[in-house]
Image (cartoon, helix red, strand yellow):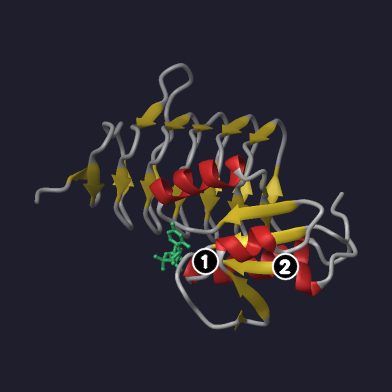
Amino acid sequence: MPTSQDLYAVYGASGCGRGVMPLLRQQLAHSGVASEQLVFVDDAPGPSHINGQRLLTWAQFLAAPAAQRHAVLAIANSTIREQLAQKISAAGVLPLTVQAANVVQMDAVALGEGAILSPFVTLTSNIRIGRHFHANLYSYVEHDCVVGDFVTFAPGVKCNGNIVIEDHAYIGTGAVIKQGQLGKPLMIGRGAVVGMGAVVTKSVPAGATVVGNPARPLQR
Ligand code: UDP
C-alpha cells in the first residue's frame, strides 16, 4: 500500500508521460496520496509544472524528501526504457505499474514490473508478459501469449492467441497479428518492428521491420 510520504514519478514528460499521469492520479486517488507526491521526471529542461504536476530533474527527484520513490518509465523507446530501468534500480527507486481503471485482465495473467496498460486494454487468460511492457489504448493480448521484456504496443494492437513476442519488439498502431498454433506459436523476434496497420500472417525474424497486408519485410 502506498504511504503518504512516498514520491511517485512518471519518468518522461512528453506525449507518453502526459498520457500516463492521469492514469496514475486515478490509480492513487483513494490511497491518501497527495497531488504533490505525483511528479514528472525528465532529463531535458522544461517548465516548472506540466498539467498541474511538478516537473523535476532526476537529481531533484532523488534529493526530494521521500520514504520511498517509485517510477513508471513512460517513454516509448524501449532501449531508453531499459537504460532507465537500470538507472532507477541502482538508485533504489521502485518500478511502478500503472493501469487504467477499465483494463480487463482475465485468468492467470503474469504481468512483469513497470507495465503501462492504457485505457481499454484487455489481457485475456494464460498470458505471460515481461518487464516494462507498454500496451497503448485499445490494444489486446489474447490467450496463451508470451511477451518479453520492454515490448511496446502502439494503440489498437490486436495480438491474437498463441503468439510469442520477444524482448524490445515494437508493434505499430492497429497492427493485427494472426493467431499461432498450440505448440507452434507465431513468433515476433527480438527487436522486430511491425508497421502500423500491418497484418502479420507468419513469424517475423529478430530485428526485421515488416509492413503491409500481408506483412512483408520493408524494402529500404
Ligand atoms: N527522456 C529522458 N531521459 C532519457 C531519454 C528521454 O528524460 O534518457 C525524455 C525526453 O526528454 C522526452 C521524453 O523522455 O521528454 C521522450 O519523449 P518523446 O516525445 O521522444 O517520446 P514519447 O513520449 O512518445 O515516448
Q: Residue furthest top?
A: 183
- Please state the quadrant of the image where ligand 1 appears: bottom left
Q: Is residue 178 visible?
A: yes
Mark 2 and mark 1: Cα distance apart in space: 13 Å
Contact between marks 2 and 1 (CB within 8 A): the answer is no
Is 121 drawn above or below residue 105 in the view shown? Answer: below
Residue 83 appears left or right of 73 = left
Q: Kindly tell me whether mark 1's CB lies below 8 Å from ligand 1.
A: yes
Residue indicated by mark 2: 38
Residue indicated by mark 1: 42
* Residue type highlighted by circle 2: Leu
**Along the line of sight, the residue nearer the viewer: 158 or 55:** 55
Residue 157 appears left or right of 210 = right
Query: Which quadrant would residue 203 be assigned to in this image?
Result: top left
**Along the line of sight, the residue nearer the viewer: 218 or 174:** 218
Residue placed at 58% from the left, 61% from the top? Answer: 59
Query: Which quadrant would residue 66 be assigned to in this image?
Result: bottom right
* Residue type highlighted by circle 1: Asp
